[in-house]
Amino acid sequence: MDEWLKAGSAEHFFEQVNLFSQGLEGVRELVEKGDTTGALSAYRQFLIPRLKRFPRKQESDYRQRAELLLENKVALLGTGPIDIGDPIDWFISPNGDKQWQSHLGYYYFTECLLETYEETGDSRYLNKWIAIMRDFLKNHYWGVEGLEYDHSFPAYRNEHAYKYGGEGRMPGYNGGSWIGLACASRSERFLDALARLIANPAVPDTLVADILYSLVTDHFYVMLNNARRFTPNQFFHVAVAMIGLGVTLNEFKIAPAAYLVGMQRLEEAAQMCVLPDGTDLEQSFNYNTGFINIFAEVKKLFADRRNVRMEELERTVEKRCNYLALITNPLGHWPSVAKTHASDVCSLLNKWGKTYDFPLVNKVVRSLQTQEDCGIKSVSLPYGGYYAMRSGWGREDKYLFFKTSRYGMGHMHEDCNSVVLTAFGQDMLVDSGNYNYSGDPVSEKINHYFFSSFAHNTICVDGNSQSRIDSVSANRDFVSDDAEECEHFLSHFKELRETDGMRCFNSDCLDFAEGEYHDGYGATKDVIHRRQVINVFDTVYIIVDKIMATGHHSYSLNWNLSPSLTQVETGVDAIHASGLEKGRLSICTFGGGKREYHIKNGEKDPYFGWMAPGYDRMIPSNDISAQWEGTGEQLLVSVLYPHVQNDFTVENAICKARSVELSLRADGAKICFAVSLDHQAQAAGGINAECEAVLHAQKSDTEIILALDCTQCGEKEYEHQNFCEKNKKVVLF
């Protein structure tokens, strides 16, 4: 008999099994006779037709990865091959990157061995997989001091000890192996491996039993007691893994609890984390894909039966897919918001379209592939606070993404009221992205920059970044025994079931959106930033920054240029950027105090002027800041003009302490705009109004008027209303 690594004995293993389950009559008889060796063999035969494999697409280099793993070398998160030792050093964290250590615990690095074994039949790969599995089972079991099983109920007595995750019996270990997400990841991979190997006599019965025992004890109990409900991607993933255990291993005693709790949590996660427009509390597009991808795995479990609860959840998945499709830019990327890297997502959208057959997703995919218009233009997602303003879906079309200041959770950056801009086949204004998850001193300094408002196209105050992350952290606890504390934090989620009341409007010739940030800037608490973005004829973007303040402050208006824009000129209230591509970007700013322009590129003390194109990678780029000082309320108007030919002219600009009036021409359009900090009489292009702001624009035979908080326009009276008028047709919003 091969050695036991987890269960201790066959008798102990079968204590976890409901031997009265249908199909286990023979196994139960052998156990009752004391023939546990025969019972294990019989139980394994019972599993063969029940374990279903759901093949995953493997990396194209899985053969090379398998060869490296035979030499105890692993490449994760874009690093070169790292020697993990034999036996494996599960503590390893190259360059202090704890995320690398955690990913080792997720266990997906072993899949290349099984893929290669199935392809070649070479036993070296299977033997290596067995050796790694033995090593894992021998060295990984739950052991936080004071944490014990409560056999009266599947839970841990000392939940507080698991408050933030951790594997206490391993000194210095960061707990990555035993957070709920790691357990969920391994649960899926262990079951997939068993489906591949269950009929292979080279895998001992005891190893099969030990893997199952680990799943239904340590893995299940950790997932049950640490849902990470305030970290949406982990909440979803853990729920799905529990459902998978309950459905696949339904003969185990924990199966009913695993299925019911998992399904309940999946529904709770969908209700709590997925907002009415499909967006997510977790403000990172990469992490928002998790719910879609893992739901596809759950759906496979119910392929041979109808489940009404799953059908309802699929409608939620469709909203999520639709929103991610609609924010895709002309390059086929998502904006690099929070922990999102700009990468081609067309294949992912195409995969979802084929998996779920969602009409809107398929329509967007066809547009991205063919460069043809799909009939969908700009989109407002006010629950998430996202606004995508586009001229079309062709690669050279213009696209501006505006992230407002809605409250969120998980993987956030200090990027409220930021914008990014793509035009003429290239990014122009960028979100600088995300560097890595490492905790070493250098990475911490780099990540501090990428998290900060200085790495985003927004406002900074008194040399400080926004304080939204601190505001969120002060109101959360992953696991709490205090019901009142949890309810206080959950109130933020409930607020997001409604929009924040900020105004937005979309049409074929004008888009408008606004956001307001009020959580302070470091020690500065008396400053509120309201930003409005207006897209006029897909030609110019007018950005209005209203800063409500009481004292004297220094301000910085930040513009982070794409690395492709290498040449920068600054003049009086103007920035002109160009590069190797044909497109140029001009930014003109009016109002506020006297500004000084500062350009930083590739600086390290402190870090400024960088963009992260992928994990643990960064390249120099131009960060431009317009800096000024002022007392009390401030008003700035910036005009963004992406262009090929320099046909942009400011005909008139009147800047007062509390108002700005502009008249300009661009790309054949005449645009007049007036805005103030107060509701007052304003004039733009012959249009007189009592309002907060008024815009008049003419291009060819199209005339548009925009008015905000209007009480009178010409001879018409309004009740403090917002409207857009196109060729005399008025739409209120």
Image: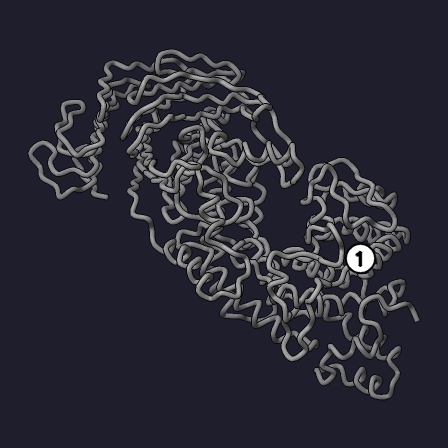
Image x and y of residue 255, in percent = 65, 74
Residue located 54% across and 21% down the image: 564
**Quarter occupied by residue 681:** top left
Image x and y of residue 356, in percent = 53, 55
- Residue 196 visible in the current orientation: yes
The foreground one among 303 and 92 is 92
Residue at the disc numbered 1:
136
**Is residue 689 shown above or below 404?**
above
Image x and y of residue 427, in percent = 50, 27
Image x and y of residue 256, in percent = 61, 76
- Residue 509 visible in the current orientation: no
**Is residue 653 shown above or below 241?**
above
Task: For label 1, count other residues whose C-alpha is less than 10 Å away and answer few (under 14), some (14-19) or many (20+).
Answer: some
**Is residue 581 shown above or below 285?**
above
Question: How was the colour assigned to the protein in this rendering?
Answer: one colour
The foreground one among 464 and 369 is 464
Q: Secondary structure under badge 1?
A: helix
Q: Quadrant of the N terminus?
A: bottom right
In the image, is 445 to the left or to the right of 374? right
In the image, is 542 to the left or to the right of 261? left
